[in-house]
Amino acid sequence: MKETATLWWDDALAGIRYIDQTQLPAKYTIVRCTSVDRLITAIKRLEIRGAPALGVAGGYGVALAANVCTEVSSGVFTRKVLQEAGRIRESRPTAVNLSWGVDRVLAQMLTATDVASAQKAALDEAKGIAAEDTRCCHAIGDYGAALLPDPCTVLTHCNAGALACSTWGTALGVARSAVVAGKHVKVIACETRPLLQGARLTAWELARDGIDVTVITDSTAAHIMRTGKIDAVIVGADRITGDAVFNKIGTYMHAVCARHHHIPFYVAAPLSTFDATRTEREVTIEERGREELAVMGNRTLIPDGVPVKNYAFDATPMGLVSAIITERGVARPPLDIGTLLSRTTSYNEP
């Protein structure tokens, strides 16, 4: 199965290239990004989206800020890159991977003693994050594939595939790895309103790979769970605290329905998505603009003057999660995230 790179550093460009996800599936566009302003716009507009991809983008963003900075004084150079890093970090508040990628590259950059060394350290670390993301996704896929029966039908929400990472994917990586292992897997992709990441992105990815995929409206999920057509629900995550999983709005609804119908509800995510410092109440859930709900193309869907609530994410209580599939193994709630993150060996929690 061919791997699709979705976000990478181009040495010749001295910048970032990425697939513009807002154009899919109608148009496949590779964007050249050579400024921090352009990267921040891409993140806010969801041209780049998905927790692991945001981690990679955060790392590359710091490397880009360092690369374009022309200051020769180490002190001034550092201050300017730190300012740009802060802007990148704050461009989306809910996904923890973005700040994780930014901070990880900054930490390496700050060990350098001169500007040239700092620029090299930043880029080397950013490229390392991208390579690590690929390894993590494949490990998550292998651990998750072992949980799936053969044959099976998996329901997923939003897009946790190659487009949400640098390649392969987390939740969709599980499906891909199961297919590679010889299992017969069908995927039911919820459309994921209002921006249709499931219909536009998940379906596009899986169809390209020749994996059986069917798109449903979000509100159909409970019905097909009740009819016994779903063997497992697998989603990604944008942040995981000790008490909740933050993911695309609608995930909580699927978790409740899966529990009611005795269907396992799995979360596939790298350890970089775990947040040991906060609880659910301390995490800001991003609210997006009214136009995403009120307008489709040239058509107005909601009367002028009527307000909307457009939450980008929701929080699923940990008690509804059957297991979390990570690059080091399968962990089952309740979780001690601090202990989990401190472990350096593989695990398989009972």
Image: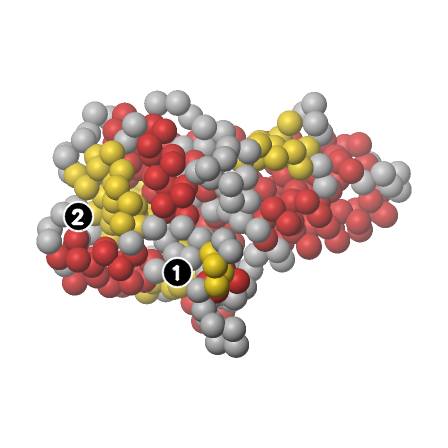
Q: At which x and y percent is residue 110?
A: 72, 43
Q: Nearer the viewer, residue 294 or 43?
A: 294
Residue picked out by circle 2: 230
In the rendered image, the vertical position of residue 222 relative to residue 232, given as above or below: below
What is the quadrant of residue 61 in the picture?
A: top right
Q: Earlier in the sequence, mark 1 or mark 2?
A: 2
Q: At which x and y percent is residue 45?
A: 57, 51
What is the quadrant of residue 127 in the picture?
A: top right
Which residue is at a point 65% across and 33% down the rendered structure image?
32
Which residue is at a point 34% across and 28% down the rendered structure image?
209
Q: Residues within 10 Å of mark 1 (few under 14, many from 20)?
A: many
Q: Amino acid at mark 2?
A: Ile
Q: Nearer the viewer, residue 284 or 157?
A: 157
> Residue 308's mark?
none
Q: Are marks 1 and 2 in contact (CB under 8 Å)?
A: no
Q: At which x and y percent is residue 293?
A: 46, 63
Does residue 27 appear to the left or right of 173 in the view shown? right
Residue picked out by circle 1: 249
Q: Is residue 230 visible?
A: yes
Image quadrant containing the N terminus = top left
